[in-house]
Amino acid sequence: MISPFIFNDKNLFLERFPLGQVNRSLQAWDAADEYIINYLNSDFDDIKLSDSPKNIVIFNDAFGALTCNLSEHNVYCVNDSYISQQGIKLNIEKNSINTNNINYLTSTDELPKNIDLILYKIPKTKSFLIDQLIQINNTFSETTVFIAADRAKEIHSSTLKLFEKYLGATKTSLAVKKARLVFSEIDHKTQTKSPFPTIWEMPSVQNKEKNFTISNYSNVYSREKLDIGGRYFIENLPLVPTGSTVVDLGCGNGVIGLSVLDQQPECKIHFYDESFMAIKSAENNIVANFPNLAENCTFNVNDCLSNVESNSVDIVLCNPPFHQQTATTDHIAWQMFKDSYRVLKKGGELRIIGNRQLAYHIKLQRIFGNEKLIASNDKFVTTAAIKR
């Protein structure tokens, strides 16, 4: 849905990305975005944006509501999400905004210096929040103004304690339209080293006496051990023929593709995820555990399998997410399945895992015209579909 986002003399129209979502009713901005912009346009003492252009870092801007409103300043957009980054670029273009002052950084890039203002959309992952707060405190000056925002129901006393622990003295605003602001002082006395990426061991399914060393960045699922869904999927992977081309779609830390290499070293694996940290984790894990096979792998940040050659892949393995940021939605699964059908060769297989209640087999039947139950338990279902 194209949403009007109107403040002062700006009349912006923002869209969610990707544009082909099944559910187009979701809005491309939220009350926390609105609260931040209204606050910045009010007469407050921390920083006067009207005096002169400022150097601003915006963390975790979902689709550009903040970036588009502040484009007259020198803006650095920091995102772990490739989809959010592309959404910001889309809305910048659609609103004919000058891009000269806008700089795009990933979650693994070095942060800029000499910043006047930090605007921080609070992520839902606690470890990612901690990691970013540590980076902020270790990078920016104590004179830098810091303002965070989220839905009021997501800002708990435990959340504020994290801001106090990793930044400094913290206070909150009153709630407006169910959103709240958080103001923290950057106090270098609280500086600490980030515990991320975390390192843990995963046993090989092929060789019970063998363990893999797994590295996980802070915004990647399963940061301390293999999750039960991942374990169940690994136990029910297909037998991969020699020379196959395999896609690990939504790869996370890459343990699915890693397990395929453990089973069949003579295959090519392409890792895809929309998280920059996920792709970095997957690459690190392949290089650490199969350094001689890393040249047979590619690591790709992408929106599902966009622009991947059709009819080019033998097997796609996927554990689809069912949310985008805080919104529960099935459009990502739909896109993953449709893209998989397109890129698979005739006779190629898509094999997925999901929670039982998601009923992915219905989607597979509609797209592929067939589906087969591979394994199931009380919580998870592994299903396959063949491109006829």
Image (spheres, grey):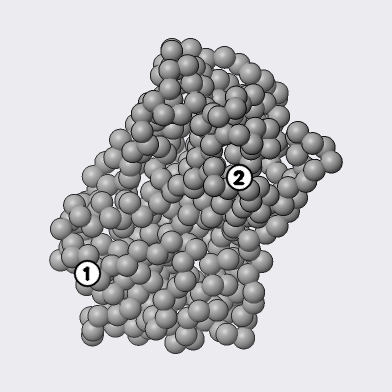
Label drawn at residue 238: none
In the rendered view, would you say 296 is above or below 281? above
The percent coordinates of residue 346 (x first, y second) are 43, 17
Q: Given the image, on which type of amino acid does mark 1 rest?
A: Asn
Q: In which quadrant is the C terminus drawn?
A: top left
Looking at the image, can residue 165 be seen? no
The percent coordinates of residue 265 (x first, y second) are 64, 36
The percent coordinates of residue 77 (x first, y second) are 37, 65
Across the whole image, how many numbered discs are drawn on residues?
A: 2
Gap between marks 2 and 1, in whole Å? 41 Å
Q: Residue at x 48, y 51 (%)?
A: 275
Query: Sequence order check: which comes first, mark 2 or mark 1?
Result: 1
Question: Badge 2, how many Cα within 10 Å: few under 14, some, many 20+?
Answer: some
Q: Given the image, on which type of amino acid does mark 2 rest?
A: Leu
Q: Residue at x 44, y 87 (%)?
A: 143
Q: Is residue 93 left or right of residue 365?
A: left
Q: Residue at x 67, y 26 (%)?
A: 236
Q: Secondary structure at mark 2?
A: loop
Q: Is residue 350 left or right of residue 45?
A: right
In the rendered view, would you say 59 is above or below 297? below
Q: Are marks 2 and 1 in contact (CB under 8 Å)?
A: no
Looking at the image, can residue 54 be seen? yes
Frontmost of labels 2 and 1 is 2
Nearer to us in this view, 253 or 291: 291
Q: Secondary structure at mark 1?
A: loop
The residue carrying mark 1 is 100
The percent coordinates of residue 28 (x first, y second) are 32, 49
In the rendered view, would you say 223 is above or below 129? above
Q: In which quadrant is the N terminus drawn?
A: top left
The residue carrying mark 2 is 293
